[in-house]
Amino acid sequence: MQLIERYAYHNRLRKVQPDHKAAIALLGLLLCLALDKPVVSLTCIAWMFVLVVFIAGVPARTFGHVLLVEGGFILMTIPGILIGIGPSAPSDPAAWAWPLGPVWISTSSAALWRGVALVMRALGCAAAMNFLALTTPSVDIIELLRRWRMPPVLIDIMTVTYRSIFVLLESANTMYIAQDSRLGYMTSRMRAIHNVALLASQLFIEAYRRGKELQIALESRGFTGELHVLPTSYRFSPLFTVLGVVMTAQLILLWAMV
Amino acid sequence: MEDLFEFQNVCYRYPGHKQLALQDVNVRLPEGEKIAVVGRNGAGKSTLFLHCNGLYRPLCGQVLFRGRPLAYDRASLKRLRQQVGMIFQNPDNQLFSASVAQDISFGPLNLGLSEAETRRRVLEAAEMCDIIHVLDRPTHSLSGGEKTRVALAGVLAMQPEVLVADEPLASLDPWMRLTFFEILQRFYDRGKTIIMATHNLSVVRYWASYVIVLQAGRVVFSGTPKELLTNRVVLEQTELSRVWWKVDPGFDEETRAPATSPGAEDGRLKETRNFHFGEDGDWSI
């Protein structure tokens, strides 16, 4: 998360209007979902790779790493599609099946193909969202949602939550070090679990206390229930409009041809 | 010397506590001064400060701002909070946005200023606090000193008449403290008032032009640093004499009591308005 965060702030597309970046990401997502063919998904991944690595200047390693982590989660859902379990042998003659006690475990080349197509499709969608995550800091995305008329209450919650993640992470880290320096994690496994529980409960109290202090600090600056902040100004980029059109055209063409 | 704040018989009790946090506080805070508020942990400094901004309402007595009792309706509070800016000890607890520029813009926009005017004020405050270079960076990547200055800029952007600072120096290194005092001086030079709680007795002696001493929820002294240094009763009663003789050459080390008038021969006291930082080290209460 820290890694994504760092590149989101330090990439060559940082100052490009978030609307454009979000539009490209959503376009990639929708096209991957609508044009359901592995070749379309693969091309979408390629597009995002070029945008993230060559245009935004994020290292290819990082792009691959993030996609790999997501791939791991996607793979976890695959066995359910790949493997069928039934009380009798499947009727499909093309399927492979093995008896295991009272049940039959079966799979087929069709199921295998379906699994591959699904993984590709999910990876294509993930790559599109990664493009947004790796080039646009959360503050910009929140700002974008504000302009897209998301209810202010949700925006305020997102703003404060995002900031609090870092504040509480730091508190948790300090507490962990304090426990560790007094040998909190050097003895038994049970003791360590107990200490984590202590840390968590303490963190909860800390979060509550900090929340109250933030409330006081905000009120002293005239808070009346809504967090008003200045919108950020960005540079308009015609390149992205062109890119979006070219990408859509290519993906549709691929889908129609293959 | 006009009074900025006047506390009349103010008392306050935190919900669920038996002890009064403030009892029968009667004190005047003069305008256009650098006011230091000292007292041991739990003496009631923060509680007193939160009354200045209408964040707490006194249980008895009343608080006057420029001669008029504070009103606690929405419009009056808004006016008061524009004029009284507050910064707290831990900047992490007052910065709510991950974007520095957005955080600074919060106060001015709450005052109902236009976007253009807010943008101008954000830049002006950032320049005053020397943080132009971090406006683009996420809040959580800043150092402690930068966070403190961002918090300060967020308050200065509202152009208050008085700055109330609750132990702002606690987590700053000596160089950053110096920078911090330079920013305060810029604010003070515009004819504004500063009220600061501190444990740093050098600050009381060389920076402050007026001192309030709190002890167990009561104000036991208010006056100039020189008056405090020559007030043997208060120094003994608050045990300030136990910790302050180290920085005061006029003190008699053997009896640990102040000499008759240590400030009188001490030329440095004349320079209270030009704060000399940490000349005698940092002794804390």
Image (cartoon, rainbow, N blue to C red):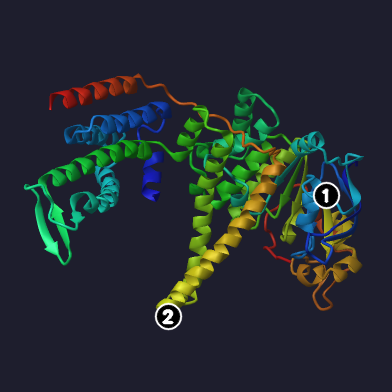
Q: Is residue A187 above or below residue B196?
A: below
Q: Quadrant of the C terminus of chain B?
A: bottom right
Label 1, label 2: how far apart the Cα atoms are: 50 Å
The answer to which image quadrant residue A125 occupies is top left
Crowding at label 2, few (<14), some or many (≥20) Cα neighbours within 10 Å? few
Residue nearest the observer in this picture, B140 or A148: A148
Give the residue drawn at x 37%, y 45%.
Answer: A4
Question: Which chain does tag 2 point to?
Answer: A
Side (left or right) of A222 relative to B237: left
Q: Which residue is mark 1?
A: B57
- In the rendered image, residue A154, in percent from the top left (x then y), is placed at 55, 38
Residue A119 percent coordinates (x, y):
22, 44
- Image-based side of B62 in relation to B169, left or right: right
The residue indicated by pointer 2 is: A187
Q: Which of the 4 image quadrants contains residue A218? A: top right
Pick out the residue farthest to the bottom: A187
Q: Amino acid at mark 1?
A: Arg
Q: Which amino acid, by three-letter code, is at mark 2? A: Thr
Q: Quadrant of residue A49?
A: top left
* Front residue of A196 and B63: A196
Q: Position of residue A40 (x, y in %)?
A: 20, 32
Q: Which residue is at the front of the view, A249 or B83?
A: A249
Few, some or many C-alpha atoms within 10 Å of disc 1 (few <14, some 14-19, many ≥20)?
A: some
For the point 82% across and 61% down, which residue is it? B21
- Image quarter where the N terminus of chain B lies is top right
Residue at point 79%, 72% (across, down): B242
